[in-house]
Image: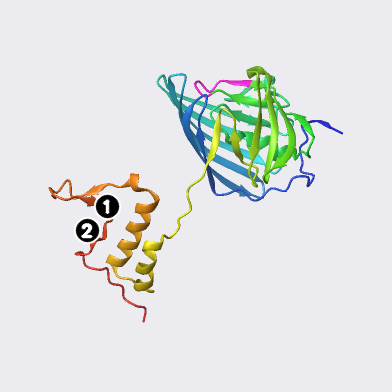
Amino acid sequence: MQQHLVGRLCHTGTVAFAPLPVSACWQHRGVRSGFEVAYFEADYWGHRFDGTTAAIEDAQSWIVSYSIELDAAWRTRRARITGRTASGLSEAELACDEAGRWRVNGRPAAHLDACLDVDLESSALTNTLPVHRLDLAVGDRAETPAAYVRALDLSVERLEQTYTRLPDEGGRQRYLYAAPAFDFTGTLSYDESGLVLDYPGIAVRARLPAFRLIPAALPVIQRSAMFASAPALAECSYRARQSEAPSMYEMEGASSGSATPRPAGDPANLASRPARRYREPA
């Protein structure tokens, strides 16, 4: 039977989340084109998230940076936001006390009272906050009004929204998210840490490729043993980078008038350089 929950604050053990990573990234696409990077810190008192999104939307570019402080129950306590557009700089500071009363830039904001989350139009990260705070079981539904901060001018309004926990799929948690003010309903998927993986029409999680050794580099490693020569290490590094990201090369030698410029890091460029010598400890 579906339960209807409003503002449940503490974890019940229904959802087990893995620890947050040090950082996460999202590629914004659909209604906007951009990129978001966030860093996470946790202590006994709660969490702090710092991040930045740079994007272009409706022919307008903007950059929004944020620092969000949460208590141990994942309730927003403070958010500092800065923005930059063609019109200039803007700032907003939101604070919420234990009673759920909000202040925006030091002034009471009664229209936000009883909101427990901040939600940034510029961020895919902030949809993580209610998921952790509510700890919904499959089939549960919760109303989660939020203090919603616009990207262009950092104006703050109340946003009514709901989350409904859906059955997991492929090891991913899924929630039906609805924001009637935007006539939006979509299924959001989350990873084991409760971070958004896919926000339809808004953003997808970007993952850095893991470094892997390629067969061509293995003989170099074997020959170099524990203390490899500088040219051997350069060859290994060069070949691995050539396989992983050939588009990232810079050309060495062009500025010096070389007739045959080579990619940066090519061992042929380094072989003539003296190997760095290390003194072994006494």
Count of marks, rendered view: 2
Q: Is residue 128 above or below residue 238?
A: above
Give the magenta-colored segment's residue range.
Answer: 151-157
Residue 253 drawn in magenta: no
Residue 152 drawn in magenta: yes
Marks 1 and 2 in Cβ contact (< 8 Å): yes
Q: Quadrant of the N terminus?
A: top right
Distance of mark 1 from mark 2, alpha carbons? 8 Å
* Residue at the right extreme, as displayed: 1
Mark 1 burial class by Cα count in 10 Å: few <14, some 14-19, many 20+: some
Residue at 60 percent of width and 32 percent of height: 199
Q: Position of residue 252 (x, y in %)?
A: 22, 50
Residue at 14 percent of width and 49 percent of height: 256
Residue at 40 percent of width and 62 percent of height: 215
Residue 219 seen in this snapshot:
yes
Provide the secondary structure element on which disc 1 rests. loop
Mark 2 burial class by Cα count in 10 Å: few <14, some 14-19, many 20+: some
| Residue named by callout 2 | 269
Mostly what secondary structure, the magenta segment?
loop
Provide the secondary structure element on which disc 2 rests. helix
Q: Residue flagged by tag 2: what amino acid is it?
A: Asn
Q: Quadrant of the C terminus?
A: bottom left
| Residue named by callout 1 | 264
Task: Classify residue 124 as left or right of residue 86.
Answer: right
Residue 173 vs residue 216, the one in the foreground: 216
Residue 169 vs residue 69, the one in the foreground: 169
